Image (cartoon, rainbow, N blue to C red):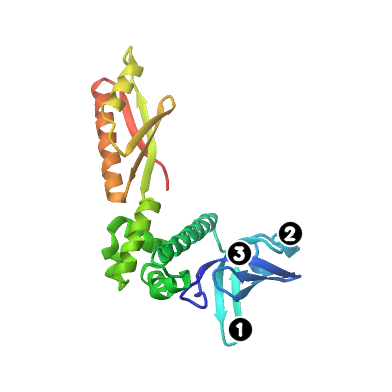
Amino acid sequence: MPSYKEYPEEGEYVLITVKSLNPNSAFANLDEYEGISGMIHISEVASTWVRSIRDFVSVGQKTVAKVTAIDLARGYINLSIKRVSPSVRRAKITESRNEKKADNLLGFVAEDLGKTKEEAYKVCGFEMQKKFGNLYSAFEAAAEFGATELEKEGIDSTWAKKIEDFAKKNIKPKEVSITGKLIIRSYASEGINVIKEAIMSNATEGVTVSYVGAPKYKIEAVAKNYIDCEKSINTVNSKIISAITKAGGEAEFVRDKS
């Protein structure tokens, strides 16, 4: 899809498609930059010793790479696959899927206004990429805060309002979550009922508690931001622990590592 940038920046993570292999290197197209390719040296393919580059990459393979060096005067871009962690790879792939969705939505916006997608990028698409980092983030902002959030960044009001319409219908609000385990022990004769009552009577919107296996219960809070998420999970935990303690039992919260 179109980008306001002609070339990537050093340190940027990019989607690539391997197009050719040599004994000591691989060459790949940068999928997000039309007509741009880069080289992956055999030493940047994997963290382990590489006897044959073909054991790790193949022609046509799509993956994520890190841009390690750029010399436009000499016409090369160096890439690394081994410097991309699994979490970064997953995040980049998710970002790419979201960008494709935003690109499609911008096309629908243009069609609704009687324009082409190319015109849409010239009028507002490239500017949205610049101001919000990528197209999908701009649609997220429109979905959550409305057209005014785009207009503040110089996006034409007619386009901004139409983008808001499509964003609110198609973009799910961004959410964050905090999870952990409640370790609950009740010594009452009807201990299971005591625990159920403590959980059910203190349940609240955005926080769920589910049975894992005695004495563990999974608790998860979901909210639009970490401040609200932290507040809600702490409130529910505190109430459940207090109820169990008053009934003569024991309870503690163990947060999952992020």
The percent coordinates of residue 216 (x first, y second) are: 41, 29
Reply above or below: 229 against 148: above
Instruction: Give the residue pinned by disc 3.
Output: 81
Tell me where residue 64 sits by quadrant: bottom right
Question: Which residue is rendered at x = 56% and y = 77% of the image?
Answer: 69
Which tag, 1 or 2, sits closer to the chain's start?
2
- Camera-nearest residue between 92 and 104: 104
- Structural crowding at the residue carrying mark 3, measured as other residues with C-alpha within 10 Å and reported as few (<14), some (14–19) or many (≥20): many
Reply above or below: 135 against 206: below
Which tag, 1 or 3, sits closer to the chain's start?
1
**Could you tell me the amino acid type at mark 3?**
Ile
Element assignment for label 1: loop
- Camera-nearest residue between 66 and 182: 66
Question: Which residue is rendered at x = 37% and y = 63% of the image?
Answer: 138
**Could you tell me the amino acid type at mark 2?**
Asp
The label shown at residue 55 is 2
Instruction: Give the residue pinned by disc 1.
Output: 75
- Camera-nearest residue between 43 and 175: 175
Element assignment for label 3: loop
User: Can residue 216 be seen?
Assistant: yes
Reply above or below: 12 against 239: below
Badge nearest the viewer, 1 or 2: 1
Question: Which residue is rendered at x = 67% and y = 66% of the image?
Answer: 18
**Could you tell me the amino acid type at mark 1?**
Gly
Question: Which residue is rendered at x = 42% and y = 65% of the image?
Answer: 135
Determine whether, in the image, residue 202 is placed left or right of residue 116: left
Element assignment for label 2: helix
